[in-house]
């Protein structure tokens, strides 16, 4: 069951209900009264209703893609959609994320979504193993919510300030680059130890390109199925711009309509040119 | 002839349209959008006609990524016209695009006049296709000149393809030409039914860290509100040179932008990059345009033409 929930057509406003800081990260909670409940691994295109392009002529101009981190149905919807409260995980790394991080309760986001294809549940009695890095932990939170709080999760961060984000998931094992929290090293070392103990798993991973590539290579070496949530710069999020392609064994795929979650087996590399900007 | 209201039904070369806002080729993939939005796309289809992405004779994978660069007020794209090729388009895309609730305009591009001819010929008798748009923003590999860069190239191209179809031919002009008005005039003289402009303006970005070209295709096309002033100037210039209808595009974000292009001489307006920011932008622009036209005295340099 490859998961794609269709989106209402066009961009709509979503009121910010709350903004909380978690170390280096900001969580925005917003109300999407006319939206459906997204599938885990899907994403939204976000911009702010005010001061986002077209006005003073400065960047940002295009909306930014964010995996949904949590979704709670409200049942208060007026149309066919249930209405939902969405949470997004942000890190201030550029003009778009900076502007989004400035938002406070009562202000409006503009969003389109849910978009793309999310995670597919493990089959054949295998258990799920979640592996995340940095701001890429976001889609693993909603996936863990769905699979159950006992689903094991391994997370890697740069340092202690970023590792605060681990508290957004349940019972995460943590690695940090500087050793300030948990294992001193990279998260794939934790993954390797887990696979040594039990390889009857499906790995679900999201994080920076180098981490995803390490996960992909390790899983390929061990013949372990993996689903990777990738990131690529995109202008639209719904297949119009053809900007977000990633190379696969079958040629270029648009990450927005054919991903963002891809079966690792279709990839020769998880390194996406231009990602991380 | 009284000024036709720009907001209600309009006619382009005999094609009846519910309003004057369509999409720019290559900025909206109705097939992918139907996956993302389901049948809501058909129920709320934002354009009065749908212009499909450029079709070439052979399949194209497109340019290597990165393909996008964000600007203040726009973007640069270096997509490279990925498409399934003519056979793939006819087999896979055309049946799905025929289900759209609006007339279909197919955009084609060839690297020789003969290639363009084969593409035009392939659609000449297709009832699903209301009109053809010729993308001349590519090099003619036989002459080395961009097909749309000089009047003689455009004339020679139309001399070759005009006899092949009775369907309206719209020539999509390139802004990267010395004299767009002269090219538009040549298109009209050689039998084009309409011209559309502007295509993207060639641009380039450097990776701030390495100093190397950022885009996989080295250069790309600039679009978005950053190019609107150029679009207004080129539509105005083309309108001074031709009597055939003009589809104006370039930086349309709001109804006022559309109104500006109509006032500069366009009969229809296309929305491109703004659809990336809001999939429903075409419908919003059409609605805003209707509101503006109802509240002001709109006069046009060009009236609505029939072919």
Image (cartoon, rainbow, N blue to C red):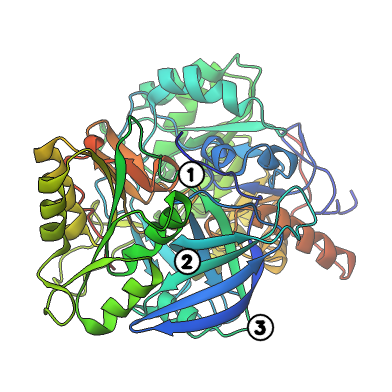
Place of residue A8 in the rendered image (x, y in percent of width and height, measured from the top left): 66, 50
Query: For mark 1, what is the residue?
Result: B26
| Residue B259 visible within the image | yes
Query: Contact, CB < 8 Å: mark 3 with mark 2?
Result: no
Residue A62 circle label: 2
Judged left or right of residue B284, residue A224 is: left
Judged left or right of residue A18, residue A185 is: left
Whole-number angstrom distance, CA of label 3 to CA of label 2: 23 Å
Quick check: B169 above or below A40? above
Classify mark 2: helix, strand or loop.
loop
How crowded pointer 1 is (Cα within 10 Å; few <14, some 14-19, many 20+) is rated as some
Of pointers 3 and 2, the one earlier in the residue sequence: 2
Which residue is depicted at the point 63% across and 20% down? Answer: B166
How crowded pointer 2 is (Cα within 10 Å; few <14, some 14-19, many 20+) is rated as many
Whole-number angstrom distance, CA of label 1 to CA of label 3: 37 Å
Place of residue B217 in the rendered image (x, y in percent of width and height, measured from the top left): 25, 51
Q: Which of B179 and B139 is in front in this view?
A: B139
Whole-number angstrom distance, CA of label 2 to CA of label 1: 17 Å
**Which chain does tag 1 point to?**
B
Query: For mark 3, what is the residue?
Result: A106
Which residue is depicted at the point 32% across and 79% down? Answer: A164
Place of residue A96 in the rendered image (x, y in percent of width and height, measured from the top left): 43, 75
Classify mark 1: helix, strand or loop.
loop
Q: Which of B131 and B69 is in front in this view?
A: B69
Quick check: B2 above or below B58? below
Which residue is depicted at the point 48% across and 26% down? Answer: B159
Judged left or right of residue A239, residue A113 is: right
Q: Nearer the viewer, mark 3 or mark 2?
A: 3
Query: Contact, CB < 8 Å: mark 2 with mark 1?
Result: no
């Amino acid at each position: 069951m490859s998961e794609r929930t269709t989106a209402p057509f066009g961009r709509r406003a979503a009121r910010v209900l709350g903004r909380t800081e978690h170390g280096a990260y900001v969580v925005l909670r917003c109300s999407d009264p006319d939206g459906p409940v997204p599938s885990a691994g899907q994403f939204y295109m976000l911009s702010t209703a005010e001061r986002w392009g077209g006005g003073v002529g400065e960047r940002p101009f295009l909306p930014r893609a964010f995996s949904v981190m949590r979704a709670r149905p409200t049942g208060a919807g007026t149309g066919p959609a249930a209405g939902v409260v969405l949470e997004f995980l942000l890190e201030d790394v550029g003009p778009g994320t900076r502007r989004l991080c400035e938002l406070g309760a009562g202000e409006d986001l503009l969003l389109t979504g849910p978009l793309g294809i999310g995670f597919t549940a493990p089959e054949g009695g295998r258990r799920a193993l979640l592996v995340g890095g940095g701001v890429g932990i976001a889609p693993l939170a909603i996936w863990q919510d769905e699979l159950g709080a006992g689903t094991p999760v391994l997370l890697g961060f740069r340092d202690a300030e970023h590792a605060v984000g681990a508290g957004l998931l349940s019972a995460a094992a943590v690695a940090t680059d500087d050793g300030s929290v948990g294992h001193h090293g990279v998260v794939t070392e934790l993954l390797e130890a887990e696979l040594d103990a039990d390889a009857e798993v499906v790995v679900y991973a999201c994080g920076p390109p180098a981490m995803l590539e390490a996960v992909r290579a390790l899983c390929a070496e061990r013949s372990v199925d993996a689903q990777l949530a990738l990131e690529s710069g995109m202008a639209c999020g719904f297949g119009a711009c053809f900007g977000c392609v990633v190379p696969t064994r079958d040629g270029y795929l648009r990450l927005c309509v054919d991903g963002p979650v891809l079966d690792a087996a279709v990839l020769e590399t998880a390194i996406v040119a231009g990602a991380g900007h | 002839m009284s000024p036709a209201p720009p907001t209600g039904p309009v006619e382009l070369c005999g094609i009846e349209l519910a309003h004057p806002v369509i999409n720019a080729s290559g900025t909206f993939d109705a097939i992918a959008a139907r996956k993302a939005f389901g049948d809501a796309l058909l129920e709320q289809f934002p354009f009065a006609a749908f212009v499909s992405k450029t079709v070439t004779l052979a399949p194209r994978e497109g340019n290597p990524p990165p393909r996008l660069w964000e600007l203040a007020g726009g973007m640069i794209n270096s997509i490279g016209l990925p498409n399934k090729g003519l056979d793939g388009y006819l087999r896979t895309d055309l049946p799905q695009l025929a289900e759209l609730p609006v007339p279909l305009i197919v955009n084609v591009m060839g690297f020789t006049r003969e290639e363009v001819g084969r593409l035009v010929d392939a659609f000449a008798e297709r009832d699903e296709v209301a009109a053809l748009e010729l993308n001349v923003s590519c090099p003619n590999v036989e002459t080395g000149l961009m097909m749309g860069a000089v009047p003689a190239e455009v004339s020679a191209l139309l001399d070759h393809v005009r006899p092949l179809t009775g369907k309206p031919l719209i020539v999509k002009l390139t802004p990267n030409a010395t004299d767009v008005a002269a090219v538009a005039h040549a298109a009209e003289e050689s039998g084009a039914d309409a011209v559309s402009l502007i295509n993207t303006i060639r641009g380039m970005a450097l990776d701030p860290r390495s100093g190397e070209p950022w885009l996989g295709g080295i250069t790309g096309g600039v679009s978005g509100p950053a190019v609107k002033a150029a679009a207004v100037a080129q539509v105005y210039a083309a309108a001074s040179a031709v009597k055939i209808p003009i589809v104006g595009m370039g930086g349309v974000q709001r109804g006022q932008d559309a109104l500006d292009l109509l006032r500069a001489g366009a009969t229809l307006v296309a929305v491109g990059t703004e659809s990336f920011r809001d999939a429903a932008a075409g419908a919003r622009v059409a609605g805003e345009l209707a509101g503006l036209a109802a509240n002001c005295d709109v006069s046009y340099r060009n009236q609505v033409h029939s072919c």
